[in-house]
Image (spheres, grey):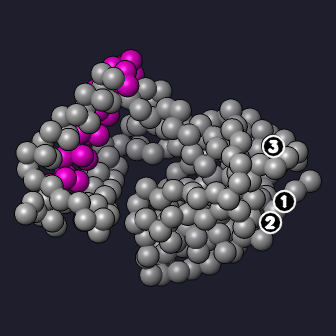
Amino acid sequence: MPSICAVIITLNEERNLPECLASLAWCERVVVLDSGSRDRTVELARQAGARVEQSPDWPGFGAQKNRALELADCDWVLSIDADERVSPALAQEIRAAVSDPGATAAFSMPRLSSYCGQFMRHGGWYPDRVLRLFRRGKARFSDDLVHEKLLVDGPVGRLREDLLHISYRSLDDVLDKMNRYSSAGAQKAAAAGRRAGVLGALLHSLWAFARAYVLRRGFLDGRLGFVLACSIAHETWYRYLKLWRLAPPR
């Protein structure tokens, strides 16, 4: 049976990490690369039997995940975030997939994300396929600061079971991530030479709401579907405003 190593990057994840690690008990090894946590993240990871390494400087999500990949020494690698969970059904499907993968170099899986306690199946949030399982040496992450992509050398298969994502536990989490992600997104866009203005920020945010709530049927998720569409619009608004401040129109 091919071996599987799960890799996780962390920073102050004591709230999320225990459940994540518990869902990975079936893996041969778990590697945690920490970025200088000031809470009990490192202690909890070691107590769970994970290999813990520390890298206090922060190069961005993509580069940090590539550092974590270099620590993996199994046949297959499962890259997972601390706020994600592998269900028993997904674990079983992963085991079956790597035992007879053929020429497949990686597998994508649907991700089911929660928003303020509710799993969201519309608004563009599902199935949200993510590439997370791959043969060691056959994939690397892009060097993006945020929203990094896995670049795979070879065919990609598809799994059916959901990866669970406990993404936003409260509105405080929404506001915190909105601020961080909008800043990183603006920096990435500015580095690519993009520019923005206030009117453009308004139009992009209105379109983001309409796409999530109407075109992608976010209204089917009830009241929180409306709240989610609003938060998507707000993140878009602030991302473009921050880009405007970084790179105003000529």
User: Given the image, on which type of amino acid does mark 3 rest?
Assistant: Ala
* Residue at 68% over, 32% down: 160
The crowd level at tag 1 (other Cα within 10 Å; few <14, some 14-19, many 20+) is some
Name the spot of residue 232 as percent of width and height, x first: 29, 40
* Residue at 59% over, 75% down: 67
Residue 141 in view (yes/no): yes
Secondary structure beneath dot 1 equals loop
The numbered mark, 1 or 2, whose residue comes first in the sequence reads 1
The numbered mark, 3 or 2, whose residue comes first in the sequence reads 2
Q: CA distance from mark 1 to mark 2?
A: 5 Å
Magenta span has 66? no
Q: CA distance from mark 3 to mark 2?
A: 15 Å
Displayed quadrant of residue 44: bottom right
- Label 2, on which residue? 74
> Would residue 171 appear left or right of 104 to someone viewing this image?
left
Secondary structure beneath dot 2 equals loop
Secondary structure beneath dot 3 equals helix
- Label 1, on which residue? 3
> Would residue 64 appear left or right of 32 to someone viewing this image?
left
* Residue at 62% over, 35% down: 162
Residues at marks 3 and 1 touching, judged by CB atoms closer than 8 Å: no
Majority secondary structure of magenta residues? helix
Residue 95 in view (yes/no): no
The numbered mark, 3 or 1, whose residue comes first in the sequence reads 1
Image: 141 above or below 102? below
User: Given the image, on which type of amino acid does mark 2 rest?
Assistant: Cys
Q: What number of labels is visible? A: 3
- Label 3, on which residue? 97
Specify the segment rendered in magenta.
216-242
